[in-house]
Amino acid sequence: VTATTALAAPYADLLSRVGGSEALLIDVATLFLEDGPRQVDSIRRAVEAADANGVRRAVHSLRGSAAIFGAAALVALAQHLEEEAAGGDLERAAARLDELKALVERLRLELEQLVAVRTRPAQF
Amino acid sequence: VNARLGIVRILIVEDDRATARLLEGLVQGWGYEAVVYHSGREALAAIEQRFRADIAILDWMLPDIEGTEVCRLMRADEAGRNVRTYILMLTVRTDRTDVIAGLEGGADDYIVKPFDQGELAARIRVGERTVGLQRTLAGKVRELEQALSQVKTLKGLLPVCAYCKAVRDDSDYWHRVEEYIADHSNARVSHGVCPSCLDRMEQRTFA
């Protein structure tokens, strides 16, 4: 992932968002690695169950995590989804699911790399 | 007013684990004690078990219970107490109606996600100041209540022994009048002999 295509904010920016603690940044990123795909699944399930309220809540949680990492494209998409779900329009929401899943996967890969680099034992 | 209140305990209710961990890590870094719950139900169960926090950061959209409902139940639980939890609601920029409903429903302040950590820290300090003021006031109220109850004791009817002047208290114990006055007022007793008693004592001594 090169700097120009990165979804997440630059490392220095991320670090300042967590009060400068790299350990905390790794903790938060690691939680997203587990929860991001899970949140996409629960959004999909709620869409399939035609549970507009469930979609809205699940998207809301995902939007919160995406915002931590400054993933503006993902936040914007989640916001559209949330608004559509609030308006009961699940057809539009369903059409956005693949794009949502792809963006979450991109963010997940970026964060996975960040965690791997930052937790790599020092080389002597 | 700016003095720290000892350890300030912050309750965090946020279903998204990454956001919850971020909040927890930040407030711990600022020297607060953090307690995290990931659902409204868990938080309410803890409050029923007499869990108390000085400040609460409540996500306004939880998967199980609305933030407004958590807030309402916390406020109901506090009824009659002098110190309340300072409730900061966590919302997103688009939820303006939520903000209004939240503040009307008992929240003290709100912060918009994604939050700026400087702003979060400042808002928490406002909460800390408010809780500090409440505690100071509650302490003053207690002092005044105690003072008032002492005043009432001395104003009421005192059962006094006709011979030795001992005073009977509410639990049927007799106290020397000097002790009773010292316990129930700020007056101190010094001993002397009045002229008529002095006369009587002299008559007895020289009789």
Image (cartoon, helix red, strand yellow):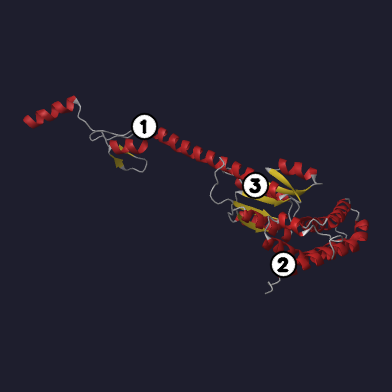
The chain under label 3 reads B
Q: Disc 2 marks which residue?
A: A118
CB within 8 Å, label 3 to label 2: no
Work out whether disc 1 and disc 3 sit on a shared chain: yes
Above/below status of B82 relative to A3: above
Above/below status of A41 relative to B184: below
Q: Position of residue A117 (x, y in %)?
A: 74, 68
Q: Position of residue B74 (x, y in %)?
A: 65, 49
What is the tally of numbered marks visible in this picture? 3
Q: Position of residue A74 (x, y in %)?
A: 85, 57
Work out whether disc 3 and disc 2 sit on a shared chain: no
Between circles 3 and 2, the one closer to the viewer is 2
Q: Secondary structure at mark 2?
A: helix
Q: Position of residue B87 (x, y in %)?
A: 66, 46
- Kind of residue indicated by mark 3: Ile
- Kind of residue indicated by mark 1: Leu
Q: Disc 3 marks which residue?
A: B124
Taking depth in this image into account, of B78 and A17 the one nearest to the observer is A17
Which quadrant of the figure contains the N terminus of chain A? bottom right
Q: Secondary structure at mark 3?
A: helix
Residue B173 visible in this rendered orientation of the protein: yes
Please tell me in which quadrant of the rendered image residue B167 appears.
Answer: top left
Distance from disc 1 to disc 2, alpha carbons, whole Å, reads: 78 Å
Q: Disc 1 marks which residue?
A: B157
- Kind of residue indicated by mark 2: Arg
